[in-house]
Image (cartoon, coloured by chain):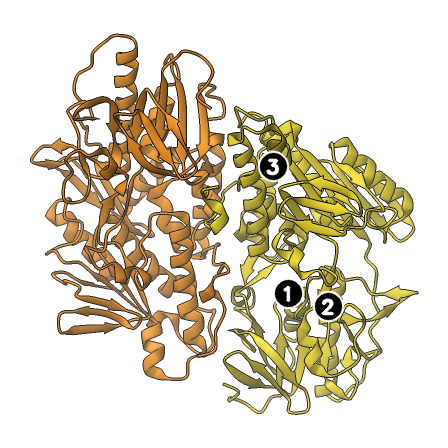
Chain colours: A orange, B yellow
Amino acid sequence: MDGGGNQPHVVIIGGGFGGLYAAKALKRAPVRITLLDRRNHHVFQPLLYQVATAALAAPDIAAPIRKILRRQRNVTVMLANADSIDAPGKRVVLSDGEIHFDYLIVAAGAMHSYFGHDAWAEFAPGLKSIDDAFDIRRRVLIAYEKAERETDAQRRKELLTFVVVGGGPTGVELAGALAEIARNTLTRDFRNVDPQSARVVLLDAGDRLLTPYLPRLSQSAQRQLEGLGVQVVTGARVTAIDAMGVSIGPERIQAATVLWAAGVQSNPLGQSLGVPMDRAGRVQVEPDLSIPGHSNVFVIGDMAAVKWRDGMVPGVAPAAMQMGRFAARAIFARVTGRTLEPFSYVDKGSLATIGRSRAVAQFGKWGFSGIVAWSFWLWLHIFFLIGFRNRMVVLMEWFWAYLTFQRSARIILDDPHARIKPK
Amino acid sequence: MDGGGNQPHVVIIGGGFGGLYAAKALKRAPVRITLLDRRNHHVFQPLLYQVATAALAAPDIAAPIRKILRRQRNVTVMLANADSIDAPGKRVVLSDGEIHFDYLIVAAGAMHSYFGHDAWAEFAPGLKSIDDAFDIRRRVLIAYEKAERETDAQRRKELLTFVVVGGGPTGVELAGALAEIARNTLTRDFRNVDPQSARVVLLDAGDRLLTPYLPRLSQSAQRQLEGLGVQVVTGARVTAIDAMGVSIGPERIQAATVLWAAGVQSNPLGQSLGVPMDRAGRVQVEPDLSIPGHSNVFVIGDMAAVKWRDGMVPGVAPAAMQMGRFAARAIFARVTGRTLEPFSYVDKGSLATIGRSRAVAQFGKWGFSGIVAWSFWLWLHIFFLIGFRNRMVVLMEWFWAYLTFQRSARIILDDPHARIKPK
């Protein structure tokens, strides 16, 4: 499978923003590229919460990786699962074989972290993949369905309580969308319950939401969420999660639906590299994003710990794109005998959306919120969505949703949970 | 749950075409209605094959039943699974409770029938639900992914062989779409295999495809399929299906993907009624669609055996809609003390699509094929799609697909099959 040509073989693990931008940046490089991913599709992560909250269909924000790269003839896309990396042996061990490389770009991303409480995963799903999004969509819609049939008032209240743990961008987006579903989308659909009576709680352990933002934007985000009816609780350190709700020390919130947006950790694939990692499992890379001792192996995106100002480069899509492009340029330079300046992250600003006409935006010391930030968010995300067709469909969906307050993807898919079971 | 008002309580089991049209036709009737379905969504079945073949996203052809009926205040929609019907006791036994009725409309549809070979189900999925469609989509896309990585020529050939069993409308549609995927959609996406070398075989036990159609339309359908590269084999009685392919007596087709479109049987719920059924498990109803001995219980759609001309009313969407409306009118008449003529089926004609600009259509003795039939098919399906939003999106998807030959929903969702496993 490695045959054909004497050109150096570049293997990229992961078809997220980092891996995809690395592959694209190697378009004119004299190399053969193999991009492998255990899923067949790239996901536009910033809009994943809209699939979870039934506003968009999965294909609106996901595209087959091989379709995105179909015209780039030096790339072979492979559906495969990388189990470990043998850096000295220059090979990646797959679940069903192995693949040799001259250069390797590791861009396998991050996964949820429950901070050692893995038992919480069952009760509080996180949001990283399309399948996670379908799981969340199913839980939220099923909660309303069960509430409609529930005769016990206390239990009905629990079914209509939704708790989001974690006040970062994903938590803020999920909480905002859940509040809009309750207030706008479902208003006329039920006969026995009033969706507007649903309670949405957003918990954060810190002293304010969206900690990397300016304090006044955090306050604005909280006000905008409260305007939608979300109950924001800061300084709330979760101590237990089970099927019936969440405990915060002695306090208890009874809730049938709990969503986890509190923490991520690096893909454990990094462990097989045998180099120093930080607490979140990220690999401490050299200034050129390669790993100590193996200058032909690069780690990028959410898997890389890269110093920036007095902290680290954040785990956001633009950072992954920049690192992907940089790793590609580093390989191009190496292959053609040139050298390169170290990687330096360029902060393009931050945006977090809360709901219809509600968002916050920060560019350096400059921040704004409300409908201006929201329009900015909307056009930027449309612009970066992969593929013209998706852009058109998403724009149309949003226009339609804006007019009607509807969500077009309220489909519960099959699952053990999807059918009402005997009690 | 049955409280509120002295109006007669009409329970409808099933939110397909029959149940939905029955509920709508009772809009102005002095009754309380409960519509129950074990899924939260109505599926526009005639376009389900497009979800299976990655041309449309699930929400394009499915809508929440409670959203469709949200403005009809005399309907309560309930997510519930009906286990059996106690006609003398006037109650439906649910998986998790029971519900009493004054009138009952049973519209739970049909499921695949493997003619006693239930073991085939694992290897040859049928197409009745959104989840079935995702399963088929996954199998087809995974076959190409595996072929791209396969080094053994014989095995690669098997991975690129797709067999559809059954030459009715669904089989014809699936075979045509599979051929278009191979010929048009995937052409540039792979490096190691040529999707155009894929083989699509359509098997039918009878002497021609689309038996209810005029013989010359059956021939036209076969020619149009062959024009797409589909190998049509009539008189092919399948004797075995396993993970490696299909046997037709002593003959063998090695194929990694086999799809089942050969037969349906009525939902087994009909058995609990204790009345005569035909061989396909359909209930033999009275001329007013009620069951013998219980004039307040109606069975409609794919579950009802209704005589028509020298055969039976076919199991198609227009028949289910007509029966749904009739059962509603019958109840309305009964409640208001009037009587009704017996049900009579009006044949609105038949359409089967084969692919881009390829279809056959029959209206009485009048039949035509090719692009005229296809345009007719297209506009009719757009017209009947539930909800303005879906119509617009589907029209746009089709327009885009027509221009680009692309399919926008090539997303493989999580499943044991979705990840490459150790061999």
Residue A319, quarter of picture: top left
> Can you give x and y, in whole percent of width and height, for residue A158 in the image?
32, 75
Chain assignment, label 2: B
The reply to whether discs 1 and 2 touch (Cβ–Cβ < 8 Å) is yes
Q: Which residue is mark 2?
A: B301
From the viewer's perspective, is A341 left or right of B129?
left
Spatial CA span between label 1 and label 2:
9 Å
Asked whether residue A107 appears in the rendered view, the answer is no
Spatial CA span between label 2 and label 3:
38 Å
Q: Which mark is residue A334?
A: none
Label 3 CA crowd tier, 10 Å (few <14, some 14–19, many 20+): many
SS at mark 2? Answer: helix
Label 2 CA crowd tier, 10 Å (few <14, some 14–19, many 20+): many
Asked whether residue B279 appears in the rendered view, the answer is yes
Q: Which mark is residue B159?
A: 3
Nearer-the-camera pick, A198 or B145: B145
- Specify which label sits upstream in the sequence, 1 or 2: 1
Q: Which residue is mark 1?
A: B16
- Which one is closest to the eye, mark 3 or mark 1? 3
Residue type marked 3? Leu
Above-or-below relation of B345 to B342: above
